[in-house]
Amino acid sequence: MIEPIKPSDIPQVKAKAIPEAVIQVVNDILARRFTNGRATIKQCEIVNELVANHGMTKNYIYENGCLNFEEIYRAQGWKAKYDEPAYCENYDAYFEFRVEKN
């Protein structure tokens, strides 16, 4: 019998649904950018890399929620957030990754 998904299952289920190429691209950029406990990655950088080097289309990326990976990183200990401009703002959407300083 199929049961409803639990909130605690989301990272694991998302990890199976998000293409590995997305996680690889984010990991690569994150490793290059990470300084002083944080890194910021523009959404367009991830998309452009996936289109140019991994055979994905923008349509596929957005229609399939390929960029909804924050929970996966949170489950690994990151403070991950996504920010996009409101209708009256003008900046590139981005992901921010942080770790708590002890």
Image: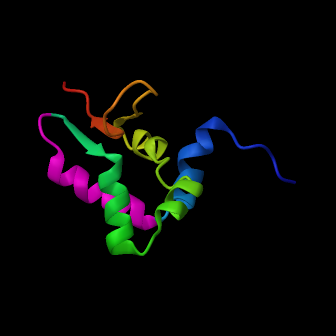
Quarter occupied by residue 17: bottom right
Q: Is residue 67 magenta?
A: no
Q: Quadrant of residue 79?
A: top left
Report the residue that reaches farthest toward the right. 1
- In x, y percent, where is residue 11? 53, 46
Main SS, magenta region, reads: helix
Q: Point out the residue furthest to the left here.
A: 36
Residue lying at 25% horizontally and 59% vertically, measured from the top left: 28
The magenta-colored residue range is 20-36
Seen in the image, is 20 located left or right of residue 35?
right
Nearer to the camera, 1 or 16: 16
Of residues 19 and 101, which is closer to you in this image?
A: 19
The answer to whether 93 is drawn above or below residue 48 in the figure is above
Residue 57 lies, with reference to residue 69, above or below; the image says below
> What is the x, y in percent for residue 18?
51, 59
Residue occupying the point 17% across, 47% down = 33
Count up the numbered dots.
Answer: 0
In the picture, which quadrant includes the N terminus? bottom right
- The answer to whether residue 85 is visible is yes
